[in-house]
Image (cartoon, rainbow, N blue to C red):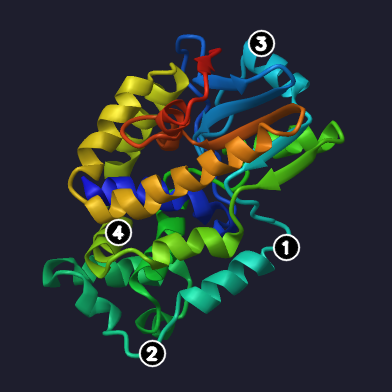
Amino acid sequence: MIRSLLRRALAAVSMGLLAAAPLAPAQAKAPAPKPALWAVSDSDTTVYLFGTIHLLPDNYAWRTPRFEQAVAGSQQLVVETIVDESNPHEMLGALAGLGFSKGQPPITARVPAAKRAALEAAIAKSGIPRANFDGMETWAAAFMLLGTQFREMGLKTGQGVEPALRTTFTQQGKTVGQLETNRDQLSFFDALPEPAQRALLEGAIEPPQDMSKEFQAMVAAWSRGDVQAIARTFNEQMAASPALQEILMKRRNANWKNWVQRRMATPGSVMVAVGAGHLAGRDSLIDMLKDGGFKVRRVQ
């Protein structure tokens, strides 16, 4: 359970390093989408909060008229972090600085013996020199191997919600900001305890078809705006790892709550787009804002 959650969490920062992949099949006929959208507002300021899926199949329909109204009324988009896919030096530099350290055990010693053959096969498919992995932090090795797994699932860079929104806002001459730098975001993964990092590495070498089923269920819940289903998934998985909940969710949500509080002092409207799990379940950004005295209303 923790492995699947960690894969989802790390997907947030993996987009900038994924190479192009075959297109996924077009979305099958399904109910009209309505992903959850909230608003925090006062007399002269509105902050829209939109939960995202960081990677989506090609041609996946998710935009609605109500959502487009919120986009049109927002002067700025703010995402978790900006990964410049055409010039990923910042992300690569942060990864090089945080993801390697001396004294690491061999990469094969960091998974159970029964999974070492699968790890070696995943490394071979990655195209990254085998010797590099022994010097990587465990989370960084998983980060690199997840790129291969996502490609095998038919997911590709640029097919998530954030890239689409960045394009929309940029084309409309609006600014795009970030809540965390690339290094900030990778630092949270670097702070994970080693057992959680090793669980992530095991998840990164599981058969793509296993992850695909989880992914499809997650996207379906998100598309229909089923926040309770998203919350159940995250609550169940976070309960098994208090450190994971504290570092990847609670700590970051608290930072973002403070950002929203500061932003409410500036007139205008802004759209904040972060992973859907941050807006559902215990210690969500939504609950933190409510606890802080803000009125948060769901508008979709």
Q: Earlier in the sequence, mark 2 or mark 3?
A: 3
**Residue sitting at 24 percent across and 60 percent down?**
199
Q: Are marks 4 and 1 in contact (CB under 8 Å)?
A: no
Instruction: Give above or below for 2 relative to 95.
Output: above
Q: Is residue 111 visible?
A: yes
Q: Label 2 belongs to which residue? A: 102
Q: Label 4 belongs to which residue? A: 200
**Residue sitting at 39 percent across and 79 percent down?**
133
**Residue 266 placement: quadrant:** top right
Residue 24 versus residue 299: which sits nearer the camera? 299
Q: Earlier in the sequence, mark 4 or mark 1?
A: 1
What is the x, y in percent for residue 56?
A: 51, 35
Q: Amino acid at mark 1?
A: Asn
Q: Are marks 3 and 1 in contact (CB under 8 Å)?
A: no
293 with respect to 112 (left or right): right
Q: How far is disc 4 from disc 1 in space, using C-alphas?
A: 27 Å
Q: How far is disc 1 from disc 2 in space, using C-alphas?
A: 28 Å
**Residue sitting at 38 percent across and 46 percent down?**
249
Q: Earlier in the sequence, mark 3 or mark 1?
A: 3
Q: Label 3 belongs to which residue? A: 65
